[in-house]
Amino acid sequence: MHICIGPSPQKFDCTCCKKILEELLENCYRREYLPGPAALNQFLDEIVIAQGEKKKIIKPTSSNNPKLEELKSVLTDWINTSLKEEHIVVRSLEEDLYDGLVLHHLLEKLGSLKLDVDKIALTEKKQRQKLSVILEAVAKCLQLEERQLKWSVESILTKDILSTLHLLVAIAKHFQPNLAMPPNVQVETITIENTSRGLKTVNAVEYITENKENLEAQSKDDAFDELFSHAPDKLDAVKKVFLQFVNQHVGKLGLNVKDIESQFADGVILLLLIGQLEGYFLNLRDFFLTPASSTEMLHNVNLALDLLTDGGLLNFSVNSEDIVNGDMKTTMRVLYCLYSKYKTKET
């Protein structure tokens, strides 16, 4: 998209670019409340989870979401239409896909693939082996790295509807991109981990289909390109807004950010900022609090980008190495994802 800059360096003629930069200069805050502990405890009491196990599930508040039900219906009809000649009828995405039979037929039909697995797997061991081959084929066909996968053999086998939906949406987008899936399907999730000290929970909002209402965010690349190239006089003002926003939320952790380029490079402050804004505590075992190498820094940044993507905040590709290397434009684009949602959140 072309963005025009007026003759005066003080004016942005492009409505989108102007709106983004004006938004960055807003200074008002609001408070967001998490569900009360009583309701959460009642919900957790109904969940059975083994010691050391971690599980992410859809909260009951999202289970009857009309858009979620619409997505299920669209995917079910799509599968049944695709496999009509095979006389396969799917009635429940939760109950009919876990053993790999339907997925096997679907991949062979859509992708003209020949998978070296049994058509029918009756035992759990055979089903697990079959799913492993199928999901490996999906990842290869869709050119997905392991960290991009939102499903696993275990989650599909245990009838995890969230993982199943992510898998089907990915397959549909690849093989039938014109399939009319409802956009902006999002659910509230809770990740539960049974530790030696009790249950640890992480709340999040997760998008299953694309967040098309956030098209403005997709044009932020152009806005920041123009900011750096044609409006350097405004760059310092925007940096100050970001620094004020960041310090307001990480200040209570005893942190003070003064430089966007260097202090976000190791991913630590970005992770802590995400935790503060999204309302959860990151397990210190999941990232390097004092990274000692570029590999550890890259691990932190990749984790942060994964969290933003899972939460529906990041819907464009980011080269994590750019952040590690101190690329300010890339870092500011990522910060804008958080700022655009939480600019009015009080500490």
Image (tube, helix red, strand yellow):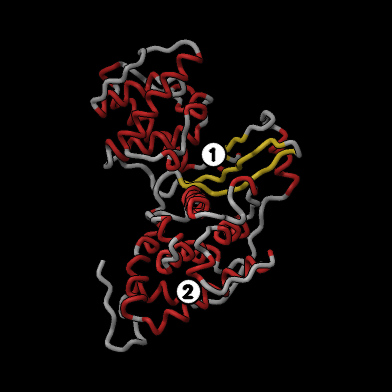
Q: Between residues 3 and 249, which one lies in front from this camera angle?
A: 249
Q: Between residues 26 and 113, which one lies in front from this camera angle?
A: 113
- On the image, the x and y values in percent for residue 328 come to 43, 69
Instruction: Identify the secondary structure beneath mark 2.
Output: helix
Q: Earlier in the sequence, mark 1 or mark 2?
A: 2
- On the image, the x and y values in percent for residue 324 come to 46, 59
Q: Residues within 10 Å of mark 1 (few under 14, many from 20)?
A: few
Q: Residue sitting at 25 percent across and 70 percent down?
A: 2
Q: CA distance from mark 1 to mark 2?
A: 36 Å
Which numbered dot is residue 34? none
Q: Give the residue pinned by disc 1.
A: 64
Say which quarter of the image contains residue 222.
Answer: bottom left
* 118 up-or-down from 278: above or below: above
Q: Residue sitting at 60 percent across and 58 percent down?
A: 272
Q: Is residue 21 left or right of residue 46?
A: left
Which mark's residue is nearer the viewer, 1 or 2? 2
Q: Quadrant of the N terminus?
A: bottom left
Amino acid marked by disc 2: Leu
Amino acid marked by disc 1: Asn
* 126 up-or-down from 223: above or below: above
- On the image, the x and y values in percent for residue 281 come to 65, 51
* 178 up-or-down from 14: above or below: above
- On the image, the x and y values in percent for residue 123 come to 49, 11
Instruction: Identify the secondary structure beneath mark 1.
Output: loop
Q: Give the residue pinned by disc 2.
A: 24
